[in-house]
Amino acid sequence: MSGKHWPPGTQCVTKHDHTKPKPRELAFRKGDMVTIIEAVEGKGWYRARHNETGQEGLLAASTLRERGAIRVDPKLSLMPWFHGKISGVEAVQELQPPEDGLFLVRESVRHPGDYVLCVSFAKEVIHYRVVHEENTLSIDSQQYFSNLIDMIEHYMKEQGAICTKLVKPKPKSGMKSAEEELAKAGWLLNLKHLTLGDRIGQGEFGDVLQGEYMGQRVAVKNIKCDVTAQAFLSETAAMTKVRHKNLVCLLGVILHNGLYIVMEFMSKGNLVNFLRTRGRALVPTQQLLLFALDVAQGMDYLESKKLVHRDLAARNILISEENVAKVSDFGLARVNPKGADATLLPVKWTAPEALKHNKFSSKSDVWSYGILLWETFSFGRAPYPKLALKEVTELLEQGYRMDPPEGCPPPVYALMKSCWELEPGKRPSFKKLTEKLQKELKHLRDI
């Protein structure tokens, strides 16, 4: 029996073939994906659903393994067939020996901004100009696509305006297919099991939709733009490494229409809206402390895994049906490494050293956590009310800190201020913050 316990909804990978099941058992082959429905009375058995066939049945825990973590690897590409700026002659060389349906995409040398689809057919290489205008791509002015991934997906299914269906991508040297790596590790989900519903949120990178995946309610982030989808691969890879009750759980990824990131559904929305719509009358201090503790525990776990959030704020904390707060949107570095684009930073939440010198660490996350505490105890007010962004940075350097929100317990305000120490080394760790909040909760319950 494996010592693991997998909660309902967990996706697992089967370790070997089981093609002759007994009655009520599930048939599967090595490497198949299954979804745990429930643990069964008696040791080491689960009822599970096969992700491909949809069949349900029993299987032994010993036949299952957890999905592997994906390495955050710059060579992992959603578009391994994209070769960038190469000439037509080089493309022909790449597509040797000739094979019908072998293809690559390159940037157009003659028409900057456009692309060229190069396809091997009948021992020749045919070059199709892909015109890029008004955020769409087209080869024949009949069929339009929002990105290259979509276009390639389409022509792999239908021949349309080109000489043959696309059969086999020619990867750029050194590039690995994200699709293959995700499938191998067990994170690639099947589009046919996903039903999409209403939009429940809108991030700066795309919509968040409510949906259902094999009977489970899910939230789905859809990123259509090629470049952004590629950047989000690193967020997804980071999410495959972690599992904690106070982090939003990644269920898997679907490569279609860009990228679909499928996550657990959090029915009560984000913390800001939760607090604003309920207010003091409905949310007691004890519940605020519980939310604060949930977040500190999730962040303590991330800190132990050497992951830095970079955008910790109440808007990125989601609340479950059972009122558990979970950290979301971790792992995405919102700033490019050279720090050229500081305009994207949420100034009022970002630590001074991160704003000035692009120094992000668990200690800069602690600063943001102090702001999140202030948001929580002010029932979702925006921090530094009435101050412009420029004033905030200047005042902080002069030692200014926000006053406590109305009704905030003094020990909680003391915690906020400890998070806002100018020297990162003087700020508490998330472990310390967790301990202090537990103490405060106990004190409140003892009164």
Image (cartoon, helix red, strand yellow):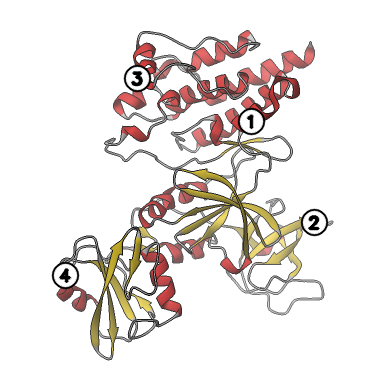
Circle 4 sits on which residue? 87
Q: Secondary structure at mark 3?
A: helix
Relative to 106, say whether 441 is above or below. Answer: above
Labels 3 and 1 touching (C-beta < 8 A): no
Question: Which of the 4 image quarters holds residue 350?
Answer: top left
Local crowd at mark 3 within 10 Å, few (<14), some, or many (≥20)? few
Which is closer to the viewer, label 4 or label 1?
4
Q: Secondary structure at mark 4?
A: loop
Q: Is residue 80 visible?
A: no
Question: Tag 1 or tag 3, which sits nearer the N-term?
Answer: 1
CA distance separating discs 4 and 2: 62 Å
Q: Position of residue 179 (x, y in %)?
A: 45, 65
Q: Secondary structure at mark 2?
A: loop
User: Which mark identifies residue 43?
Assistant: 2
Question: Tag 1 or tag 2, which sits nearer the N-term?
Answer: 2
Question: Tag 1 or tag 4, which sits nearer the N-term?
Answer: 4
Tell me what residue is drawn at x 31 percent, y 77 percent: 103
CA distance separating discs 2 and 1: 31 Å
